Amino acid sequence: MANINVSPGILQWAVERSDKLKAVMHKFPKWSEWLSGESNPTLKQLESLAKFTSTPLGYFFLNEPPIEGLPIPHFRTIHDDSYHIAPSPELLDTVQMMERRQKWLHEYLADQKYDFLKFVGSKSINDNPIHIAKAIRETLGLKDGWAAEFSTWQDALRNLFNKVDEARILLVVNGIVGNNTHRKLDVNEFRGFVLVDEYAPLIFINGADGKAAQMFTLAHELAHIWYGSSAAFDLRELHPADNKTEIACNKVAAEFLVPGAEFLKVWPSVENNSNRFQQLARQFKVSEIVAARRALDLKKITSNQFFEFYYNRITAEAKSNGNGGNFYSTQNYRIGRRFGEAIITATKEGKILYNEAYRLTGLNGNTF
């Protein structure tokens, strides 16, 4: 089999991009020879390297490494030397996968004569966050104080997931790239992203994050849809990036989950209790972390008090969370129930071929 002459710079870039230098040296014994130009990989070896480093095969035929970037803004709470300037292959591949699904769903819904969603981009960052939060609740069919109907905040979150789906917003929750358990999504890089579209707005929540933080991420992403602003973000410690839209989205999210006027009425009765955040969480059916964050927003606790509680809670949650779960139940969140239903309907009606359905869902055969 003929060997392929690949630029050493491309090889080095692909490995650095994947952050697998030691693993590559172990898996490919001639790696150092390829870098020095003493020998070249065969096409089969190059295909194996491309798969191992999650690099598109065509990139190895370029003279220089491509400049990769997200098609949407990526807002980071903190900028320092520990953050990669370029997005990870996992984030890039996930956004591109969601773009393909959204494009297909947009065309499908338009072809089915669905109306566009009037709430997408209907608000401005100059509008009152209280009014926007109210508009979101009304669109989702949620009454004021809706969460009080549920016994736990986890039940309230599940109900919120369902309401978002019913509003024709494509909701995806996944902690890996597609179904590849070897490619985990990094919460430190992003907690979620939004792809705005007038027919099929898409919300992606990083499922590797704790459930407590996912609730706030979802509310933040809903605000993005009402502002008509696509973005990815990390929301480190539930803080927004230094950006007007991000700050506005956080204000709307906080008001949506814990209305300020109601919080201030309840606070005097719990502020001196050691379990005050647990009591607030039960009152508003949000996670304790969200309750604590709201107390910080409204200047009822200090930053130090919030951070101490925040890190204690996420550490405890990480220890208590189990792994695994039913594969087929998980797919409802990994694929998005609304998207999955549309794909199945279109396939049964012959409007889409099975191989295209497999490509869009990442599933095959009997699993599909």
Image: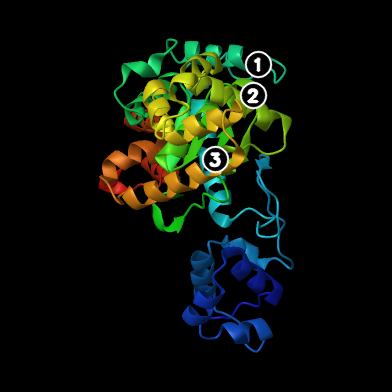
Badge nearest the viewer, 2 or 1: 1
C-alpha distance separating marks 3 and 2: 34 Å
- Report which residue position mark 2 lands on: 228
Q: Mark 1 or 3 closer to N-term?
A: 1
- Return the residue nearer the eye: 118 or 60: 118
Which amino acid, mark 3? Gln
Residue at image coords 60%, 36%: 302
- Return the residue nearer the eye: 157 or 62: 157
Image-based side of 194 in relation to 69, left or right: left
Which amino acid, mark 2? Gly
- Report which residue position mark 3 lands on: 305
Mark 2 Cα-neighbour bin, 10 Å: few <14, some 14–19, many ≥20: many
Q: Is label 2 in contact with label 1 (beta carbons under 8 Å)?
A: yes
Q: Residue furthest bottom?
A: 38
SS state under label 3: helix
Residue 119 percent across, percent down from the top left: 57, 15
Residue 198 percent across, percent down from the top left: 58, 21
Residue at image coords 65%, 56%: 83
- Report which residue position mark 1 lands on: 123
Residue 180 percent across, percent down from the top left: 41, 55
Mark 1 Cα-neighbour bin, 10 Å: few <14, some 14–19, many ≥20: some
SS state under label 2: loop
Q: Mark 2 or 1 closer to N-term?
A: 1
Residue 196 seen in render: no
Quadrant of residue 299 within the rendered picture:
top right
Q: How is the image coloured?
A: rainbow
